[in-house]
Amino acid sequence: MTTAALAQASNAAIYAAMITLTFAMVAFAVSFAAGRRRATAVAASVGTGEGEGSVAVLTRPSDSPEQQEAGRRSANIAMSLTWLSFVLLLAGVVMRGIWAGRVPWGNMYEFSISAALATLAVFLFLSLRTDVRWLGLFIVIPVLLTLGMAVTVLYTEAAQLVPALKSYWLVIHVSAAVICSGAFTIAAAAAGLGLLKGGLERRALKRTGSSDGVLARVPSVERLEAFTNRVVAFSFPLWTFAVVAGAIWAENAWGRYWGWDPKETWAFITWVIFAAYLHARSTAGWRGSKASWIVIIGWLAFLINYFGVNFFVNSLHSYAGVS
Amino acid sequence: MSTDEEPTEQAPAPLPPLGGLGFARWAWRQLTSMKTALILLFLLAIASIPGSILPQQGNDPLKVKEWIAGSPEVGRVLKSLGFFDVFAAPWFAAVYLLLFISLIGCVIPRARQHWRAMLAPPPAAPRNLDRLGGTVTLDVTAGPAEVLADAADYLRRHRWRVVSGPSGTADGAQWVAAEKGYLRETGNLVFHVALLLILASVAVGGLFGWKGNVIVKEGGGFANTVTQYDAWGGGRLVDPDSLTPFSFSLDSFEVDFEREGSQRGAPKYFEARVTYRDEPGSAEQRAVIEVNAPLEVDRAKVFLVGHGYAPSFVVKDSSGKVVFKDAVVFLPQDGNFTSTGVVKVPDADPQLGLRGLFLPTASVDKIRGGESVFPAPDDPAMFLSAWTGDLGLDTGMPQSVYRLDSESMTQIGLATLRPGQVWDWPDGSGSVMFTGFDRWASFQIAYDPGKEAALIASILAIAGLMLSLFVRRRRIWVKVLAPSGAATVVQVAGLTRSSSLDDIDLGALTDDIDALVREISRAEATAKEHT
């Protein structure tokens, strides 16, 4: 394949992935709406019941078969579309790498499409082990936003790596960081969903005495928190590894393993915030929603490190390739 | 400090008791509590932020000066508070030192506790196993002793710590108790101790390490003594007079730039070819230093950090005598290596100074003047302004070699030269020839005796972290209930000490229990075949 054809194929695969992901987003949204319809239907039947409202609150009403079927079917379609998007995106990233003749991690466009790929990969990996279809909508949206930004604002022609990036540490350090970007995004999505669900439940309980709503299909707040904890427990050692690998590389390239360059500083801040999260999980009065907020703050620190430091701060790590 | 502690009591902290010892004990308990550690972690994160927003003395002293010049009043306040050197500021040190003290205060008692837990046998089976999640009850025909021996054997083979007995239970039933996952707490402790080691390694590097920068022209040499550095800094316990005595010379410097595409002008590679000796008199060795590929000499590392042009000049006086003949380091001002430099000729009479602007690929713009449009020397040109008078070298004040103090000098002319061209001064007092150019490379040379220890500690930290997050501390009990008829009724149940709502955690325990139940049933089946 000629290079021009490869470039076109890579871009086409990424656009195709965005299209299938959009359909996946719609299907995830439909399965959510099915959950909502069910909730309203139950609420209506409770209203017509005679003095049994309080009982309906305690026992979780079961779905009617058709509604259950509709929601499940669209969630399954969404998962299939997500798998398809993953394959397309993988093809796009790989072809980008072949086109450039190196690992596809030379500038922010390439970091972004790789981060999108990693987020889908972590999500799909989790989906093999436990049911995470409820999380799909909240994963597909940030992935689509990242891809949208990549192809519009960040797009760069493939070029040679600048000498500072020519090292096998690029593969080790960046791959760990890219996977962490996916895992942190998923942890933050689950934490945010837990906060939202907790808030809605408290409000709904006050107003109507019923706790079912839009997020009825989402697992309980406690399970969301356990899920978040599990994902952070996976990504925190990996992030530690990414930082240490970066330090080894920095020692080799710049003559010091740690120099408080803005990128290093924000990597450290992100690390400290997630360390605080793990401590909060075992501190009285800090479990639950406060811990969830820490995850979201940690994710924001990660984003600041990625976007903020590349665009607004003069850092040794400014490889955006965007002029 | 770890993730599987049950939340401690919710009660408000008691007031500090009066009296010296009581207060000290209270303060220590406060400092080493998890809540304090949490707050200190947040403080550490927040305290780091200004270090990434404001320019820092250690990374970019010039930017710090500019910032303070830009807003002197705020700048002075921030400077006195250490905001331009955050990571050396006392308040930053206070946060991390308190955090580490809190850590030590937490690790020591927990290490003792963990030691005792590892020596202690798993606790006896609780009276009512039904209360635990995932309890399995099964009937077997084998006798109680046989079933329990099989179960204990199986658990031991799978590296559970096992005890058995009727002791400790009120109903006198026979049981086997097993526990696994002690490595979780071990890993947790290793992780925290490793963090202390990293801090110690950083301190060793700071006290015994040194770092310097030097610019070497092609054909030039460098010997590792403090006086030869352009900038040098060492730890408090470094003897500047006894640095490792290696030396090297820069034979040539190669660089190539991207000529096509969006990254036109970006460097494709640089390499510095050097000849070095470990110490005076030892054999010469050759090496190529590249970005990402430093040269290691006697535990010090030589890194290539920058490069530029060193135009060469021959200056003659009115009689045609050569008064200056050398290549001069010019500093690049932009990505296309528009470079500025100064030639000082103290041997001319009167003294002579030249200010130069070197353009590797010249383009002259009517408004902006001369600038370079590409970093490679495709079309080199030199803009010179010549000055005569007193260079001011005899005042005793140190002078920058990159700046010409023209206060007591008069300009004698301007000229644009191509390589090989000669410019005769208008007043006939001499001439300058721009003969061509060499390149120079700048090196950072660093010695950090703490870095190997820091690396080992980091690896320990990651290993400890993974153990503390992935190993699950869990218990299993097998209990024989009071026999009802011919069958032996066996109950198997377990307990995981981490968050019980975690699918994967619970799943792992369920798998353990199922495997054990299968083992008991299988033993039962083979026993039947035998009879």
Image (tube, helix red, strand yellow):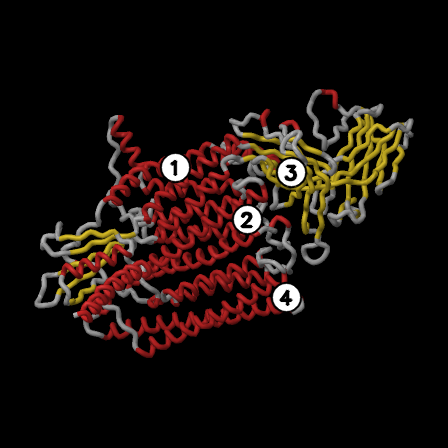
Instruction: Give yes or no for contact between labels 2 and 3 (Cβ–Cβ under 8 Å).
Output: no
Tell whether A259 sits left or right of A47. right
* Figure quadrant of residue A44: bottom left
Q: Which chain is home to disc 2? A: A
Of circles 4 and 3, the one toward us is 3
Q: Which chain is home to disc 1? A: B
Dot 1 or dot 3: first in sequence order is 1
Q: Indicate which disc residue B100 carries.
A: 1
Q: Amino acid at mark 4?
A: Ala
The percent coordinates of residue A7 (x first, y second) are: 63, 66
Assign a secondary structure to mark 3.
strand
Tell me how far mark 1 sits from mark 4, CA to CA. Answer: 52 Å
Q: Amino acid at mark 2?
A: Val
Let me know if marks 2 and 1 both belong to one chain. Answer: no
The percent coordinates of residue B332 (x first, y second) are: 71, 41
Read off the residue under disc 3: B443
Q: Which chain is home to disc 3? A: B
Tell whether B494 sits left or right of B350. left
Let me know if marks 2 and 3 both belong to one chain. Answer: no
Let me know if marks 4 and 2 both belong to one chain. Answer: yes
Read off the residue under disc 2: A309
Tell me how far mark 4 sits from mark 3, CA to CA. Answer: 38 Å
Tell me how far mark 1 sits from mark 3, CA to CA. Answer: 36 Å
Instruction: Give yes or no for contact between labels 4 and 3 (Cβ–Cβ under 8 Å).
Output: no
Q: Which chain is home to disc 4? A: A
| B375 to B80, vertically: above or below | below
The percent coordinates of residue B470 (x first, y second) are: 36, 53
Read off the residue under disc 4: A7
Q: Which residue is situated farthest in the left direction here?
A: B485
